[in-house]
Image (cartoon, rainbow, N blue to C red):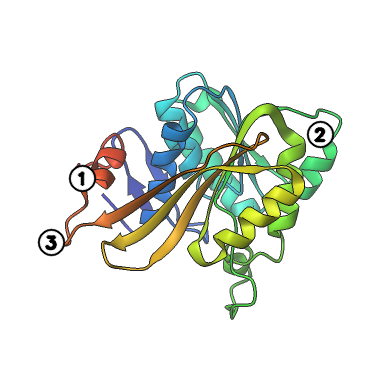
Amino acid sequence: MMGNDFFRFKQFEVKQDRTAMKVCTDSCLFGALLPVMAKRPITVLDIGTGTGLLSLMYAQINPAAQIDALELDQAACNQAAENFNASPWSSRLKAIYDDFKCFNTAVASKTGVYDLIFSNPPFYDSDLKSPDQQRNRAHHSTDLSFKDLLTGAIELLKVDGLFAVLVPFSRSEAFIDGAALVGLFLKNHYKIANAEGKVFFRSVLLFCKKKGNVIEEEIFIRNSKQEYSLKFRELLQPFYLKL
C-alpha cells in the first residue's frame, strides 16, 4: 500500500515525506535480492540509506544482521531513524548522519569491519539537475562518485566480504571495470528490465575480493500480460502486501 508520504509493507512501513529518494520498484527489487545474494552476513553497512528501505528489508530476512545505515542528508537520516525505531528490528538498525568519505576516513584504521556493504548510490553524472538541492544530492554523483564509493568500500570490507550496488545498466560496465581497478571482482550480475523484450535499465552487481566465475541472470519485472513476473513475485512476496 503506497501513498505520497509512506509505503506500507507486510512487516514495516516506510515514511518518505522528508526524503528526495522515494520508494520505487527497482529499489524494492534490489532489497529483495540482497538476502538472496548474501544470506549470512552479520556486520552490514548501508551507504546512502535514504528512507532506510534496504536496511529494513535486509533486517527482516536476516535476523542476525547488525546494520549501520549511513546518510549524508540530515532530514533523510532523521526519517530513516524514525522508520527504524518504528520497525520490529530497531535494536539492530542504526542511522548515522555522515558523509561516507569522512566516515571511511574515521574508521580507516579498522580495516575489514563489514561482512556486507550495499548501496543504491546517486548515479546521474552529467544529466540535467533540478532546482531542488536535496533531490540533486540524492540522484547525482557529485557528492559521492563511483570511485569514492569503491575506494571506501574495499577498505571497510572484510577479506571474505561482499559489496552490492544498484546502478543503471548503461553504466554497469564502467562500474565493473572501476571495481576491478581497486580489487573488487564481479560475482553476480542481475540484469533488470521492465518486461521481456524491453531493454535492460538497471543492474544489480555483487562483488567480492577474489576473482572467480560470474553468475548472470535476467529479471523481468512484468510478463507479457503486464502482470508481475513469477520471479518478481517470488522475490517480493515476503514484503509486498498484495503478493
Between disc 2 and disc 1, the foreground one is 1
Q: CA distance from mark 3 to mark 1?
A: 12 Å
Identify the disc placed on residue 176.
none
Q: Secondary structure at mark 3?
A: loop
Q: Tell me which numbered mark, 2 or 3, is placed earlier along the sequence.
A: 2
| Label 2 CA crowd tier, 10 Å (few <14, some 14–19, many 20+) | few
Between disc 2 and disc 3, the foreground one is 3
Q: Nearer the viewer, residue 108 or 187?
A: 187
Residue at image location 70% in from the left, 28% down from the top: 158
Q: Is residue 199 above or below residue 67?
A: below
Q: Tell me which numbered mark, 2 or 1, is placed earlier along the sequence.
A: 2
Q: Nearer the viewer, residue 109 or 232?
A: 232
Amino acid tagged 3: Lys
Q: CA distance from mark 2 to mark 3?
A: 50 Å
Q: Position of residue 155 (x, y in %)?
A: 77, 37
Residue beneath disc 3: 225
- The quarter of the rendered structure image containing the C terminus is top left
Identify the disc placed on residue 230.
1
Residue at image location 59% in from the left, 73% down from the top: 132
Identify the disc placed on residue 107.
2
Q: Position of residue 146 (x, y in %)?
A: 68, 57
